[in-house]
Image (cartoon, rainbow, N blue to C red):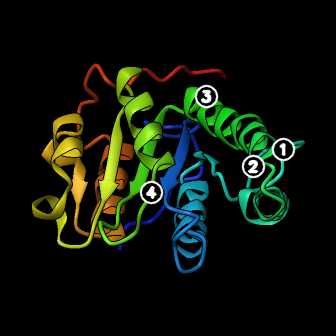
Amino acid sequence: MIALAKTPENNHLYGATVYLAGAIQYDDDNGLSWRDFISLKMKDLGIKVYSPTNKPSPFVSEISEELGAVDKYIKEKNWDAAHDYIRDKIIRVDLRMVDKSDFVIARIDPEVHTCGTYHEIILATTQKKPVFIFIKGGVKNIPRWLLGLVRPRYIFDGIGNLLCYLYEIDRSCFTLNNKWILFDEN
């Protein structure tokens, strides 16, 4: 078992920020359980977490007021209001969190339709940020488009293997490549 660090000494990822990308709308629990689990592990490493299911103040979470507002506009067939709300309160905020993150962890389930996750991964890769994906069955099940964006060594068959890799990075077992640009703000 790897003991988690809570100090910046000899820990590459201490003070970094991660964004958690993954399906919400069609996910069984709105993507909460895996995000909650990883959030605790990241916080133990001293990593700040951005999540669309737990947005920083003053923004609201997609799974609370946001979904209710969007559903209301759709039920009323007020498509312009739904568009404006989704663009301004969901997409802009989520993509800004990707902008502010140092790296991204994404959960991909090929059986669950998602749009925002792909957008977030594409944004992070165009910004040259490390993106780590976990998907049941690992790299052999990754959609081809994502395989073209994310190196196979950053695609894992589950949360556990991904976390072990991040712990190794944090513990200096790997030399960080040029995708990692972490600032020491102390």
Identify the residue shown where x is 51% and y is 37%.
Answer: 9
Distance in Å between CA atoms under marks 3 and 2: 13 Å
Q: Which residue is mark 3?
A: 100
Q: Quadrant of residue 96?
A: top right
Q: Secondary structure at mark 2?
A: loop
Specify which label sits upstream in the sequence, 4 or 2: 2
Q: Which residue is mark 2?
A: 55
Label 3 crowding class (10 Å Cα cut-off): few <14, some 14-19, many 20+?
few
Whether residue 144 appears in this view of the structure is yes
Distance in Å between CA atoms under marks 4 and 2: 19 Å
> Which residue is more in the foreground, 148 or 181?
148
Please tell me whether residue 172 is drawn above or below residue 37 in the rendered image: above
Identify the residue shown where x is 55% and y is 71%.
Answer: 37
Specify which label sits upstream in the sequence, 1 or 3: 1
Specify which label sits upstream in the sequence, 1 or 4: 1
Residues at discs 3 and 2 in contact (Cβ within 8 Å) = no
Give coordinates of residue 136: x percent, y percent: 25, 72
Distance in Å between CA atoms under marks 1 and 4: 22 Å
